Amino acid sequence: MHTDFKQELNEQQLQVVLETERPLLVLAGAGSGKTRSLIYRCAWLIKEKKVPPKNILMVTFTNKAAKELQERLQNILGYSVQNLWVGTFHHICTRILRNEASFLPFRQNFSIYDENNQLSLLKKIYKEHSLDRERFPLQPVLNRISSYKNRLLLPEDLNEYNLEISMENYKLDRTVPKIYELYQQNLLLNNALDFDDLLLYTAKLLQNNELVRKKYQQQFQYVMIDEYQDTNYAQFEIVHQIAAEHQRICVVGDDDQAIYSFRGATIRNILEFEKDYADAIAIRLEQNYRSTSHILELANAIILNNRHRHSKTLWSELGEGYKPELFVYEDDMEEANKTADLILQLHEEGIPFREIAVLYRTNAQSRVFEYACLQRNIPYTIVGTVHFYQRKEIRDLLAYLTVIFNPSDNNSLLRIINEPPRGIGSVSINRLMEFASQNHLSLYQTIQNVQAIQSIQPGIKKKIAEFAEKLEDWHRKAESTPVLDLVKEVIDSLDLINHYKNSQDPAEISRVENLIEFVSSVSEFSERWIEEYDKSPLLEDFLPFVALQTDIDRVNEAADTVYLMTLHNAKGLEFECVFITGLEQELLPHLRSMNSKYSIEEERRLLYVGVTRAKSRLFLSYAKYRRKYDSFYFTEPSIFLQELDPNLFAGYNDAVTFKPKPANKVYAKPKTLNNNQFYIGQKVWHTEYGPGLVLNVDGNGPEARLTISFSSGKLAKIIASYVSPEPI
DNA sequence: ACAGGTTCTCTTTTT
DNA sequence: GAGAACCTGT
């Protein structure tokens, strides 16, 4: 292993590996090989310093990064490492909280609530307490609660000093703590935690319980944190409680890539590391191994406009390469079409689709690109928009699994009590709820004792009892049955496949595919689990995995597809060719970020992150008009473009002032879609239902109603603008 | 109980 | 323009 080192790493990277016994701050520029350094450091600890893997804590930003780290570690060491604590903060906290639940106000089989669950809980609270959704809008209230939690403030910790009451929002500011209190009570009633709770309760536990704190200080002898610039106060405190004693902590980050302050991340953590850990040394990695220098020049020029940063200049030995190109388009449709044409051109030049990414600020921008790719037969993967786990059929199935694991979860039980329909309507449900609250029972306990409720009709009682018995049966089985078998049994027993297959609505048919994909994802999870732990995973192992899984974690790199994603999702990735689109005022920087200097700097970092993803080709663009909701808007080029020297872009050598290049006419005009062209017998394509044949056309233009026979065998009436003619 | 229609609300980024 | 909430007729 020694010899590999010297060749694989530069001097600073080597220092990152070897400096294991004192606090270490690694200021690593984009593409400077920080991940590689971390992996070698980990390998060095295990192989040369004989540190047992279970004594190493390694925090990554995504689950995907954790998985990759483990794979690469295996490649270096030549064997698979078991019992290493590697994962995201949320994942590691879940493990700790499950272990230590006896000290906490919830039980170890707690549910993890995502935003949808949070909202439905909050809506229920609003109803019960007649709260006004106009005066106290849901999302802002949730954001406030989240911000309290990120500062480790539970409702009982709130006082006049930390409430932050403002004049403009007096009423809201005064009421949020009361809603927060109800919300938190309700979570615990359901034996559920939201994402922020995972961090909050872990941090509080480590702060307040000496026994537990000592235990984890002992266990985690070596601590490493990636993307440290995007940690919040709660995360800082968790790390600090564990590492402050032995001080064998290594954090890696780049203040220029901090893009998550909206969820409480504070750049303070990285800027003050040397104050928090007095003995710390700092290592800077500035040589970039990813991009050619024209791209880095642009990146450096962009970030130079930020005032709040450590100064740093990236350089590379990969040669000048291509200059970045800038395009200005008429509207968002043209932007999408021309971008897709460029993608085809790059592909013809020999660049695989998977090496091309289209990045944008907001998820809503993905639609037009998806459409343009579809028309040209360009394979693509959208990361982000409709998460797999947010589809109705998957959420329903997950609600079943959640209730089976955590019967106290009334919220999830309500979701499935009549799904698929089994004749339990709102009247009966209300009577169940009434009985539950009068007798201080959970909804689950209530349905188990449904015979005791006078007000419910005998016929419906029978249905409820059957349902209750099924759940209880699965609940008992789940303790010992592998999760894969359990999931299959639930799907079979509920006859979900036929339920969706026999539906008249073609939208329901695609649900079958999703269920099948879900089963195969459980199967894949099981295989990996068996590989690591030599036993089949149970439901309790699987649930936290799905709850904390994100869209980017599901990306399948084997497929040769173009990637469409937000700039946030692109963090940590790299591509041969990158398109950054929508460089307009109010979009990038986003309207909601334009009110403060600080948040504009964060938007600029977002652009910087995007630019530094590109290895050899970079294309920036904006449109002069953009469709927003249902009308067109004039746009203005992004301030981030205006502040740049035009010479940084190709074709601007003589220009003194910023003048965007008009869209290049060299590229073939795309086949623009004329909606009148739909005709009976035409082959068409629909994003969700796949290929089909037009049987009838009712009306004209984009409003026309098409009757389509899809290959799946079903008929559907669909508005013309949702279908595209099949590419030839 | 439930299907089908209409109105209302919310539209930045995400673990 | 999408999704949820609400309403109405069978």
Image (spheres, coloured by chain):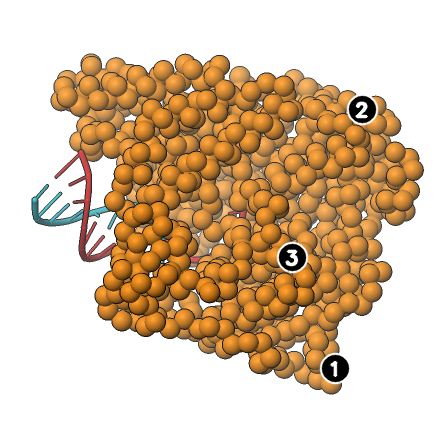
Chain colours: A orange, B red, C cyan
Camera-side residue of A534 and A122: A534
Quarter of the figure with residue A360: bottom right
Residue A82 sits above or below residue A299 on the image: above
Q: Mark 1 points at which residue?
A: A653
Residue A185 sits above or below residue A672 on the image: above
Task: Please tell me whether mark 1 or mark 3 is closer to you in this view.
Answer: 3
Q: Mark 2 points at which residue?
A: A51
Task: Please tell me whether mark 1 or mark 2 is closer to you in this view.
Answer: 1
Residues behind callouts 1 and 3 on a single chain: yes
Residue A579 sits above or below residue A424 on the image: below
Q: Earlier in the sequence, mark 3 or mark 2?
A: 2
Q: Position of residue A13 (x, y in %)?
A: 84, 45
Q: Mark 3 points at which residue?
A: A352
Task: Please tell me whether mark 3 or mark 2 is closer to you in this view.
Answer: 3
Q: Mark 1 — on which chain does it sit?
A: A
Distance, label 1 to label 2, CA atoms, is 56 Å
Q: Mark 2 — on which chain does it sit?
A: A
Residues behind callouts 1 and 2 on a single chain: yes
Quarter of the figure with residue A693: bottom left
Camera-side residue of A467 and A411: A467
Distance, label 3 to label 2, CA atoms, is 41 Å
The residue at the point 74 percent across, 37 percent down is A72
Q: Which of marks 1 and 3 is nearer the N terminus?
A: 3
Quarter of the figure with residue A94: top right
Disc 2 packing (10 Å; few <14; some 14–19; many ≥20) = some
Please name the amino acid that badge 1 sits on: Asn
Please name the amino acid that badge 2 sits on: Val
